[in-house]
Amino acid sequence: MTPQKHKLGIIGSGQLGKMLLEEAVKWDLNTAVLSNEQEAPCKILCREFVVCKSYYDYNAVYQFGKSCHTLTIEIEHVNVDALEQLEKEGVCVFPQPSVLRIIQNKGLQKEFYNNNNIPTAPYQIHQDKLTILEQIETGNLKFPFVQKLCTGGYDGKGVSIINNYSDLDLLMDGASVIEEKIKIKTEFAVIVARNGKGETVVYDAVEMVFNDEANLLDVLVYPARISDSLASKMKNLALEVSRVFNHVGLLAVEMLLDVGDNIFINEVAPRAHNSGHHTIEACGCSQFEQHLRAILNLPLGSTQILQPAVMINLIGEKNHTGEVWYEGFEKIIANPGVYLHLYGKITTKPFRKMGHITVCDTNIEEAILLSHQIKDQIRVKTKS
């Protein structure tokens, strides 16, 4: 392989693409990015930056991809028909369009798990709000439940939790998965990497804590504070999900653990994922380098834990929209074992992901304690 002559195309231009490019630059890959905005985190790192109106635009995706040797994504909301045509014409597209088509639609995802005996929460699929209401009235759908739009949702958007009749005004119209609301003890994620040879590696599970108001990942703990037996079950289940998808690249597998210690697959992401940012400092090979290794069909890297870690998402404060100002920046970087990653976004708004912080320590409880202090010291606000 001659890296300088291998053109890697990335569809999507946010922070995931930026961190992927940081690894690609180390290998001197020829990189191009398709973006739906003029200014984006990826712009400063790629050799070629192409702007389109929408990632669903067939011609934009096709024209961008046809000059690439390998094409990947940092966002699922992409025109799959264009990717399929590029694949037919010899472009290496990962994740494969057939995999992406299933994952793009939460209804198809659910049916895929059901057909492959993958444990997932009991569900119904409805095409609109009216049929959901009809099922409630006939007693075929009982409270509480979770509504997830089949398409278009991300970062907590497109999800509503319906506990009783008074929550029905939160119902969204459109094709939806209606899930039984599981009594969740904790949420976890396990990342698997698979290359074209079918070789796989798996990272240890992370324990996830969510911001209930924004429905966004707030903090993760690595490795998860669970028994060896449960940790092994989660890794094996993630490997089984990876096997049935037969994907190439990363697969982030989100899991729910209920009060009876039963594991359910929530959903998956076929790309670098928020639940894997800690791997940059805490593991032998980061999720971003691992993704490159997988899609370029190279030997996969080590998933060994180098040090326990806690990752904190930096999100925009409520009532702050405009040019970003990181209050407490100097305080937090003075701490040893604290790694700050800012995403290059010029403006902030409520709950927008602006960066993350990884806190590492040989003792996970010490890392958790320091992470609480760090969270109190930094705020993402407007400059004024």
Image: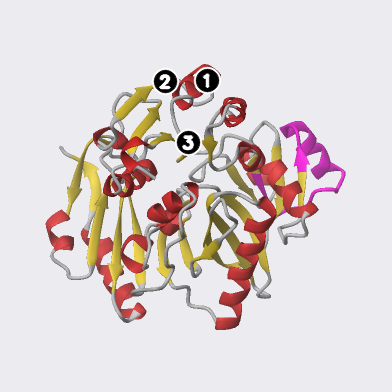
Q: What residue does disc 1 label?
A: 57
Q: Earlier in the sequence, mark 1 or mark 3?
A: 1
The kind of residue on which mark 1 rests is Asp
* Spot occupied by residue 7 in the image (x, y as percentages of width and height): 39, 34
- In front of the other: 14 or 184: 14
- In front of the other: 41 or 62: 62
10 relative to 246, above or below: above
Direction right: furthest residue: 138
**Start-end of magenta stretch:** 125-147
- In front of the other: 125 or 241: 241
Q: Residue drawn at (56%, 27%), measured in percent from left and top?
A: 86
Toward which corner of the image does residue 6 lie, by quadrant? top left
The mark found on residue 71 in the picture is: 3
Do the residues under discs 2 and 1 have CB atoms within 8 angstroms?
yes
The mark found on residue 52 in the picture is: 2
The kind of residue on which mark 3 rests is Leu
Q: Residue drawn at (47%, 36%), measured in percent from left and top?
A: 71
Number of numbered discs overlaid on the protein picture: 3
Q: Residue drawn at (42%, 34%), measured in percent from left and top?
A: 9
